[in-house]
Image (tube, rainbow, N blue to C red):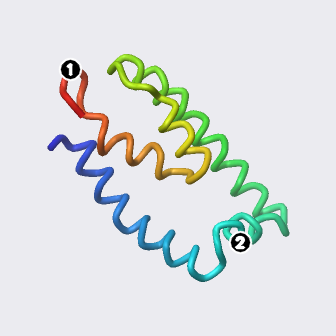
Amino acid sequence: MDKHRTLAILILIPFTLLTGYAVMQVGYIGIFDYHRHSPAGWQVITDLVIALLLVLLWLIPDARRRGRSPWPWVALTLAAGSFGPLLYLVFAGRRGEPA
């Protein structure tokens, strides 16, 4: 297992637990609703959108280079944020290596 995949798994596990807890407490929409009430929240959401768009600028050509469709990963990123890129790193494999 390469270091990128290992790191992604180490981040994904606690992030999944935190996200599950947050969704249980406030619901999926509640996570976003919390941030719409102040300029500080708007900044956090804007920063997240910018960061994920930059990640997708890397992910899409990387998936194509590996002969994979990037669209499931794009859809997952748009629906679930960082889960898309993290799972891509877990399952994508290295260039020339099966996922």
Disc assigned to residue 30: 2
Q: Position of residue 20 (x, y in %)?
A: 49, 73
Please name whichever residue, 31 or 72, is drawn nearer the observer in this view of the structure.
Answer: 72
- Quadrant where the N terminus sits is top left
Q: Does 30 appear above or below 72?
A: below
Q: Amino acid at mark 2?
A: Gly
Q: Does 96 appear above or below 52?
A: above
Callout 1 secondary element: loop
Q: Position of residue 47 (x, y in %)?
A: 67, 48
Quadrant location of residue 22? Answer: bottom right
Q: Does 49 appear above or below 53?
A: below
Identified at 56% across, 53% down, the residue is 80
Could you tell me if the residues under marks 1 and 2 are in contact, i.e. CB atoms within 8 Å?
Answer: no
Q: Is residue 12 left or right of residue 98?
A: right
Q: Amino acid at mark 1?
A: Gly
Disc assigned to residue 57: none
Q: Residues within 10 Å of mark 2 (few under 14, many from 20)?
A: few
State the residue position of label 1.
96
Identified at 77% across, 68% down, the residue is 33
Callout 2 secondary element: helix
